[in-house]
Amino acid sequence: MTRIFSGIKPTGHLTLGNYLGAVRQWVDTDQHRAEALFCVVDLHALTVEHDPARVRRLSRQAATLLLAAGLDPAHCTVFVQSHVDEHTRLAYLLECTATDGEMRRMIQYKEKAARERATGGSVRLSLLTYPVLMAADILAYGADEVPVGDDQAQHVELTRDLAARFNQRYGHAFTVPRAVLPTVAARVMDLQDPTSKMGKSHAETSGIVYLLDEPDVVHKKVMRAVTDSGSEVTYDREGQPGVTNLLEILAACTHRSPVELAASYASYGALKRDTADAVVELLRPVRERHARLCADPGHVDEVLRAGAEQARSLARPTVDAAYRAIGLMPPL
Ligand code: ATP
Ligand code: MG
């Protein structure tokens, strides 16, 4: 059976980008067609300036939101990365497989390091090695597929390289996985800056729709979205990035084609109104289920406890085998 792994970082409140780019696929198809594991990757949240209490709170919130979005523990495994030691155990072996040049080429490293420096912070070594830990997250489970947004495609490509290199040098240890991207809204852009990706850790929040935003807040953010000069609605990422972003969001919400939608609008105003309505309807059931789950934290705890146990039992044999393959002596 196909094995699927994907994760989400507790670096902020989950956004519409996270939902359309990743979580919706996990809920609608992945958990039903494969053996799927979904992880709150909390260790990755420590790669940038962080507040310990906030990371702890956001980890629980992310897990609760994944269940509210529709992940069903009867069909998939939901767990927290730091509860399963195999991730960090394997990351070290992969650090001995990767090169520093490969790490420094990662676009996300360059962007996030620049952001840390711009705000007067220093760049943690873990930000540089983050893609190796991500590779370990995936390879520990022998995942065939990694459903992610477009921004993570480069990291999955690196994971493939590391798996193939390890297999070639030390004998077959890992499945070489592939990224699976949604066809529409694989990169939802910030509503106030449609040339940059909507990201949950960004400080400027007016262009970000969060899954738990109230309907009136969603309306306000979408109606104030930056659009482009001119008044025609065309699907053109280069020439009309703001309008194109709204078309992608509306298309993803309504399961229609963004190009077809573009032809049916004569003005930006109507497009914004329909997009706002569609997003509100998309998020309504998630917000409602989230409120119910918050009233029953014991249930979320139990899901995460059982999830970690299941994840551990899957990862252990693969990681142990990699330890032997690379030349480490078995414990006596
Ligand atoms: P951060 O700013 O901390 O990196 P993020 O919003 O990018 O947060 P991640 O936890 O890094 O979220 O990513 C979780 C998943 O959501 C990944 O599969 C990623 O590709 C996807 N994703 C993140 N942002 C977007 C976006 N704007 N559009 C589509 N997919 C996205
Ligand atoms: Mg990200």
Image (cartoon, rainbow, N blue to C red):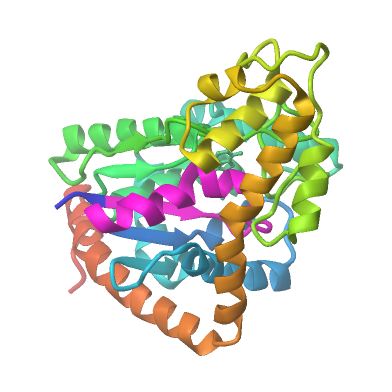
* Residue name at image x 70 percent, y 44 percent: 276
* Residue name at image x 62 percent, y 13 percent: 236
Locate ligand 1 by image quadrant: top right
What segment carries the magenta color? Answer: 4-33
Is 248 drawn above or below residue 286 in the view shown? above
Is 287 drawn above or below residue 44 in the view shown? below
* Residue name at image x 19 percent, y 49 percent: 2
- In reply to whether residue 266 is colored magenta, the answer given is no
Is residue 216 shown to the viewer in this render? yes
Q: Quadrant of the C terminus?
A: bottom left
Residue 125 position within the rendered picture, expressed as x and y whole percent measured from the top left:
61, 45
Which quarter of the figure has residue 36? bottom left
Q: Is residue 130 left or right of residue 274?
A: left
Nearer the observer, 314 or 187: 187
Which quarter of the figure has residue 261? top right
Q: Is residue 134 left or right of residue 249?
A: left
